Amino acid sequence: MYVATLISDPKRANLTAEIASSATVMLGGKGVKWLCENVACDIELDTKPADFESVWQALQERKIDLVIQPAAGRRKKVLLADMDSTMIEQECIDELAAEAGVGEEVAVITARAMNGELEFNEALLERVRLLKGLPVGMIAHVLKTRITLMPGGLELLATMKRNGAYCALVSGGFVDFTSAIAERLGFDENRANTLLQEAGRLSGKPGLPILGREAKVQALNDIVARRDLQTTDVIAVGDGANDLGMLQLAGCGVALHAKPVVAAQTNVRLNFADLTGLLYLQGYAQDEIIAS
């Protein structure tokens, strides 16, 4: 048995009964189960339809996401999440760079690294070098004035934790930011790189070894081993090339508003939903979601 989940952006709420019924017919489904009126619904399927891509494309044109997955084992016991442009709406290093006067230069490097055009470690070293001399206090300033949470994150964490899930924030960014975001959202642990300091200013060097793509895979393996679980028990979410390893290993790897290179290599793509979409993918209904 399979289940098709249709999800729209809650701010748009444009998933109408007509669209859901039409999708049911195109997919050969057995009827609609609403998870949240005009936002998300499930359609039960006996088999995975051969023309998935054509239906997916038709729904994308209406700004609605479609994911088909096995009906069994949807609810996950671990959430593994990227931070930048995933749990928050910004790239922290780009925001720091803007304060240092090198915002455009760093943003170009970040974009190329997240698209898989540059090797992650080299890109990180170059970007951190450009931050040399920035007062350490600027980190707190950026957190306070420039960083905003991705919509749906508070609900995602609260609901999954209420249902016994373990939540980890794993970032190629910096612990100065992940520790604050993890505390704000309620993550059980966070892993990230460190920004070295000298006399109250950034030294222009990160701590070694650099945590990149493989560190996220290692985090997933560490957590499931420690909790006596399987990789199929994990839902992972990210948007950049350094997230691909964990997205491909997790039972449900979600490319959220992802870079093209990431979307092309993942089976679960959410281009319009916010982070509550990860709850609907697991079959949570609106009345089960804990409001922020």
Image (cartoon, grey):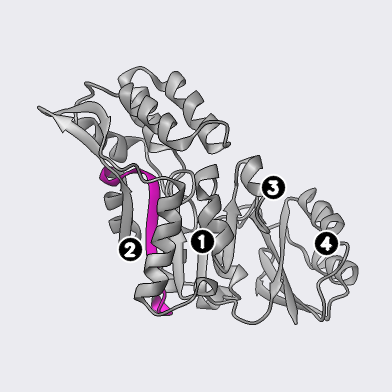
* Element class at badge 4: helix
User: For this rendering, which residue is in front, 7 or 105?
Assistant: 105
Report the side of 121 relative to 38 (left or right): left
Q: Position of residue 77 (x, y in %)?
A: 46, 76
Residue at x-position 23% and y-position 24%: 134
> Does label 1 or label 3 sit earlier along the sequence?
1
- Callout in the foreground (4, 2): 4
> Does label 2 or label 3 sit earlier along the sequence?
2
The residue that disc 4 covers is 52
Callout 4 amino acid: Phe
The correct choice, above or below, for 207 with respect to 96 in the image is below
The residue that disc 1 covers is 236
- Most extreme residue toward the left is 199
Residue at x-position 46% and y-position 48%: 213
- Callout in the foreground (2, 3): 3
Question: Which quadrant of the rendered structure holds the N terminus?
Answer: bottom right
Callout 2 amino acid: Gly
Q: Position of residue 76 (x, y in %)?
A: 51, 74
The residue that disc 3 covers is 264
Query: Dot 3 surroundings within 10 Å: few (below 14), some, or many (20 or more)?
Result: few
The correct choice, above or below, for 91 with respect to 98 in the image is below
Question: Which quadrant of the rendered structure holds the C terminus?
Answer: bottom left
Residue 54: which numbered mark, if any?
none
Callout 1 amino acid: Ala
* Element class at badge 1: strand
